[in-house]
Image (spheres, grey):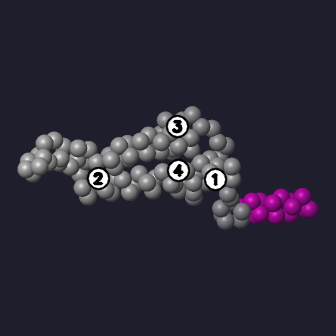
Amino acid sequence: MTPLLEDMGVLTKVDGNALVRYCQLWARWKKAELFIQQHGDMYALRDERGRIRCFQQYPQVAIAHRLSIALTKLEAEFGMTPSSRSRIYVPMVRKPSKLDEFLRSHALSRGAQSGQS
């Protein structure tokens, strides 16, 4: 996630704590979602004779839901959703490629040569 946010130009050293929280929340959300995939959303509550009385939602369903809301808020803060990206202005600072550097140095050397002639 860090390289993607750096490429977007929205990550600075100050954002470390928020990024750590995002990663922790994401790991917990993923764990809850894996549980739900393996066990389903609900389980049967049975009476003393073993008959199904009703169905109960696993706690992981509510946990996943709450974590999803928290993750969505942090994603918006980092500009990780389409609508939040439209509200964030970050000047694009692009590292020059090797081609850019070559062309720049070539243009500078040609300029120096033409100035000497």
Instruction: Give amino acid for label 1.
Output: Gly
- Residue denoted by label 4: 22
**Residue at 90% of width from left, 58% of height from top?**
115
Where residue 66 appears, as percent x and y from the top left, is 41, 42
**Residue 30: mark in rendering:** none
Q: Which residues are magenta?
A: 103-117
- Residue denoted by label 1: 16
Of circles 1 and 2, the one toward us is 2
Could you say which quadrant of the image residue 28 lies in? bottom left
In the image, 92 versus 58, the foreground residue is 58
Of circles 3 and 1, the one toward us is 1
Residue 112 in the magenta stretch? The answer is yes
In the image, 114 versus 109, the foreground residue is 109
Of circles 3 and 2, the one toward us is 2
Position above or below: 93 against 104: above
- The mark that comes first in sequence, 4 or 2, is 4
Instruction: Give amino acid for label 3.
Output: Ser
